[in-house]
Image (cartoon, helix red, strand yellow):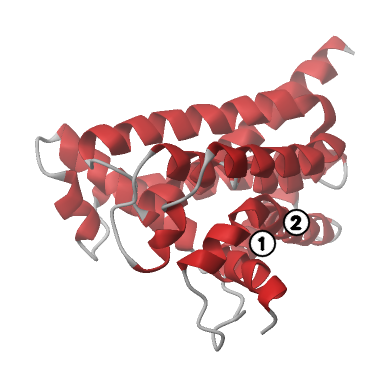
């Protein structure tokens, strides 16, 4: 694999289920260089979800179409972000009960909090897609996919990574990388979501701040599960913000 394509392959393999670069032995250095491309990868996943939802809505009820769209996103990412959400939810549940959240997050079995979080997230996301596709192609989904992938970079910039392997990509992530990723995310989101973009960025930022602070206090740093949960919840609440802006504009028209 050519040197200049390794960061692209690293970003794709880290965030999706695409079999990219498996034979190239990609490492933390490649992923660190490719981190700035996370919003672009997110936009591709978002475009897939939006396209499947819109196409299915031409022949199916919108909620059924939305479920297929969500399923396409879960398949494209191998449910990695959902897995992170479930583990973090179990960790939060454990900490609320006075137990060590790290033990709960290491348990391969999904607990009650994890099941509830994943189920509610999928239900909410399907409902949001169903509402957004009613008026046409849901471009906001592309924007949500893009801007939500900035969140793990921001967390990696502020917190130390608690792990090994490709987690080494976080070692030298700086504010410049986070800023560049945000610029790319905005460049994609503004044409897609237009006036809803500020609200969507704010929603993702709130998710990143809340999970980042919890991770720092309870875990002492960030984990891959925290990154995944931040992406998943950031994407969902960005769609909440987008729909809220659309409803507000519709009511004032």
Q: Position of residue 197 (x, y in %)?
A: 74, 29
User: Which mark is drawn over residue 2?
Assistant: none
Q: Residue at x 36, y 69 (%)?
A: 165
Looking at the rendering, which quadrant does residue 248 occupy?
Answer: top right
Query: In the rendered view of the protein, which quadrant contains the N terminus?
Result: bottom right
Residue reaching furthest to the top: 252
Q: Nearer the viewer, residue 252 or 158?
A: 158
Q: Secondary structure at mark 2?
A: helix
Q: Is residue 142 left or right of residue 15?
A: right
Badge 2 is on which residue?
53
Q: Position of residue 172 (x, y in %)?
A: 46, 50
Q: Is residue 111 left or right of residue 235?
A: left
Q: Residue at x 15, y 53 (%)?
A: 103
Residue reaching furthest to the left: 98
In the image, residue 76 above or below residue 148? below
Query: In the rendered view of the protein, which quadrant contains the C terminus?
Result: top right
Looking at the rendering, which quadrant does residue 187 occupy?
Answer: top right
Mark 1 touches mark 2? (CB < 8 Å)? yes
Question: In this rendering, does residue 140 appear at all?
Answer: no
Q: Position of residue 75 (x, y in %)?
A: 58, 69
Q: Position of residue 132 (x, y in %)?
A: 76, 39
Q: Residue at x 76, y 27 (%)?
A: 196
Q: Is residue 58 left or right of residue 2?
A: right
Q: How many marks?
A: 2
Q: Nearer the viewer, residue 244 or 156?
A: 156
Residue reaching furthest to the bottom: 23
Q: Secondary structure at mark 1?
A: helix
Badge 1 is on which residue?
68
């Amino acid at each position: 694999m050519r040197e200049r394509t390794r960061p692209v392959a690293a970003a794709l393999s880290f965030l999706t289920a695409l079999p990219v670069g498996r034979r190239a032995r990609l490492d933390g250095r490649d992923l660190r260089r490719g981190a700035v491309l996370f919003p672009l990868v997110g936009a591709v996943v978002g475009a897939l979800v939006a396209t499947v939802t819109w196409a299915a809505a031409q022949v199916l009820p919108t909620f059924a179409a939305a479920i297929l769209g969500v399923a396409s996103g879960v398949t494209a990412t191998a449910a990695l972000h959902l897995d992170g959400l479930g583990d973090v939810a179990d960790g939060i549940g454990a900490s609320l009960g006075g137990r060590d959240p790290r033990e709960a997050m290491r348990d391969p079995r999904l607990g009650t909090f994890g099941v509830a979080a994943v189920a509610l997230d999928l239900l909410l996301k399907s409902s949001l897609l169903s509402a957004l596709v009613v008026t046409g192609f849901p471009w906001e989904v592309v924007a949500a996919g893009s801007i939500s992938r900035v969140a793990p970079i921001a967390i990696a910039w502020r917190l130390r990574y608690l792990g090994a392997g490709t987690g080494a990509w976080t070692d030298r992530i700086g504010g410049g990388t986070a800023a560049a990723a945000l610029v790319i995310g905005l460049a994609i989101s503004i044409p897609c979501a237009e006036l809803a973009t500020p609200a969507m960025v704010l929603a993702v930022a709130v998710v990143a701040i809340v999970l980042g602070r919890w991770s720092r206090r309870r875990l002492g740093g960030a984990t891959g599960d925290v990154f995944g949960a931040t992406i998943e919840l950031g994407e969902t609440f960005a769609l909440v913000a987008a729909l809220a802006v659309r409803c507000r504009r519709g009511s004032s028209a």
